Image: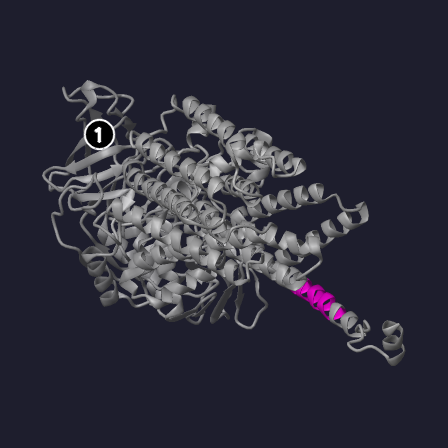
Amino acid sequence: MKATSRPGRAACLLAAALTVIAFCAGDALARSHPFGPRTRSVNDLGNQFVPFHAHLWDLLHGRAEGGLLVNWQSGYGASFLPDLGTYLGSPFALLVALFPRDEIDLAVYVITVLKLACAAAAMTGLLLACRPGRWWAAGLLGSSYALCGWTLADADYNPMWLDGLIALPLLCLVGEWARTGRRFLPGVLVVALAWTANFYTAYMATLGAALVLLLRLVLARPPVRQALATAGRAALTTALGVGLAAPLVLTVYFGTRHAYPGRVRAFAPVPAEDVLARLLPTSYGWGSPALYVGTTALLLALALPFHRAVPGRVRAGWTALVVLAVLSLQWAPTHLVWHAFATPQGSPYRQTFVVCGLLVIAAWHTLSHGPPGPRALIPAAALFALITALAGRSTVLRPLTWPVLLLAVAGALGGLALLARAGRRGPLAGLAVALLLGAQAGESAATTAVTTRLHLAHLDDYAPWGERQDRQSALIAEADDWPRHRTDPGREQTVGNDPLVVGGEGAQYYSSLTSDVLSRTLTALGGGWTSRGRSVQSLDNAVTDVLFSVGARVHSPPDPHQRHSPPAAYPAHLTRRDVPPLVTVRPRPDHRPFGDSPYRNQEILLGSRVYTVPPLTVRDDSGRPLPDRRTGAGTARTRPVITARCPAGTQVHLWAPHYSGTARLADGTATLFNAKDTRNRAAMAPLGTAPASGLLTIRLTPNRPGGIPPGAIGCLDTGRLHAAAARLTAGGAREVTVSDGTVHARLPAGSRGLAVLAAPRIAGWRCATGDGPARPAGEYHGLIAVPVDPGTTSLTCTFHPPGLRLGTAVGGASLLVLAVLTAGAALRRRRTPMPPTTTSPRERVTTAH
């Protein structure tokens, strides 16, 4: 039976429908958006993926600042093509254009559901292509694959990973085509699409498909020459497909080379009982392999070694592959192979979907040879009982696991037993099908509901679009005047990528590809970050606003959705500032290296002294000085006080990157600092104005151990800052135009020194003055810089993402090879003589005799 036949199409539709119904029912049970009031934007879904889809919406509707090369809204100018390849490479992402802008959360949810439906259909097609069998059974197992534990626990809030879920069965089909010598061109295109959609999971899916093809060859035992030819076709198909995806893949690869380094962690396998427990419905645990594929599929996979109707080689081969794949999850060398030789910073079991796919294919080999009888089901049930008993000690099991498991086992065993007795037709067969489909849908819906609720309990979560974003977006639209100046969405962020969601052009940026130079530069200037430096935050500071041409800034109350936020004390509002243009000229640039003090670093970049950094004293509750300035470490340090002196009328700033809690100047508003070990760094913040006496009393309320550095207080002279900004404006560009990856500035006559573009000097920028040649841009304390002579009146800087030229060359070469091979194959087919459609008179006479 082929998947393209009528039963095959029915099977694919059944798998897709069953998947959508179970998944949506589970979210409805959990009262999760869009079926209830609870948000589903947890962790990076709210911080990264929804914002990047919002930016794609803006790009498709011509409303984004920037284009495919540069995203001018984030990080003061970030390379966008690597982010596109990482988060938005899937063709499904384009569907956001069909939704209203303020329904971007719904758009991402619909895309997620569609991807799950396609994964179910793709696996169903693969099963029927591997071996004919009952169409409804293929649909059931296709759905069990799409709703595996990995999907529900890890991938439904990492929607770009779901492209790997679709890619695995499609790449296995490509292996089947290579084995039979068919569909070379479609195979190459499938590989290219998989690697373009999400190269990370496509790499894992390619490894899984290679294992499946290898096993198929071992079981088929073709002649050595034929086996080598098959391997060669598969390798060539994969190489050309990856080559076609190279423009995006290599851009992402080089983007990671220039990204801020994340945490390096060693792999540590989880206890065996946790691995076994994740095979059961409703189990949930962070950092363990979510192997759940449904009770029916698991029982069928366990029955495979005992099912006599299945050839012995098939039983032994698929059983061995599944066991080895499960063991590879727990061994450090194979763990590294699965993850391209780099342990992930988050969940260390991202390859689990491949193992789930192998379990489902093994289950199909059991059922497609006929329903297993008691001789296979009884030992399978015994193994299942042993797994359950061993898993009972695991903490990843939930109270709901046991009733759901009991009903699922009853439905699965009852359905399989009835199926073995009833044959293909009759009332018993219909009842068996109903039991099996009901058990699959019910336990998957329950598992979806439990994991959705536990996501909210264990992960950060963010509210969907609402009144807060409406207000922020309206204020930004009112003030936005890019590229004359930037408009920052503000320090009180809603998600980690506010500029992509509500508009504007700010420092804030969260990506796996956040550049090293951006993170280090903003850190040196007093900026804060989370996610160990890859989620940089806006910096509410007048000096950095001048340095980066931030002429308007939104000030919002803390997001009430966040648990740590106090009630809103003021409405969101806008402040404006006169700032220099994006391109300024420094006649005498200060090349001293940055030091430890962000106040002095800001002055070096500004070219003027504007701060007073006074000595300070930190005292405990009883008034005794704390020589080590540690806070929150003991009962006597629960409410320490900082004292210092600032010139009257200056703006008081506190820089305490390792302090967590609130700080209040006199009777002013409490300001939150949120440092946490190596994960979060607190940003410099303004506290208020120094009184006429100059004596400062800053009251601290720490919520965890931290510390205050010796130069923590900076007193900003706003008059000096205004004069410095006026000088930069007078010598700055007269006109600046920005178009995607090109910046053109008209400089005043007689400019001399160093032209500085207020954007991070990420790899890929080249600049030219006047009619001169373009050269790699220089750097001035992390910003783009170009020397200019008195005769220079214009500056042009262009950006080309590293890896794009090489990737384009590789892609072009792959396309050329593919075209030659396709044309050659077509020519050979034309030259091959066709078999005669009629017989000659001589043949007719011979036949008659």
The residues colored magenta run 812-824
The secondary element bearing badge 1 is classed as strand
Residue beneath the point at 66% across and 41% down: 215
Q: In what quadrant of the picture does the C terminus appear?
A: bottom right
Report the front residue among 217 and 342: 217
Residue beneath the point at 22% across and 53% down: 719
The reply to whether residue 262 is visible in this rendering is no
Q: In what quadrant of the picture does the N terminus appear?
A: bottom right
Report the front residue among 234 and 767: 234
Report the front residue among 678 and 176: 176
Q: Is 292 drawn above or below residue 180 in the view shown?
A: above
Q: Is residue 698 left or right of residue 171?
A: left
The reply to whether residue 649 is visible in this rendering is yes
Main SS category, magenta section: helix
Q: Is 766 drawn above or below residue 831 in the view shown?
A: above
Q: Is residue 29 left or right of residue 388?
A: left
Amino acid at pointer 1 = Pro
- In the current view of this chain or complex, which residue is farthest to the left? 667
Residue behind mark 1: 702
Check if residue 818 falls in the magenta segment: yes
Residue beneath the point at 75% across and 68% down: 825
Where residue 586 sits, quadrant-wise, is: bottom left
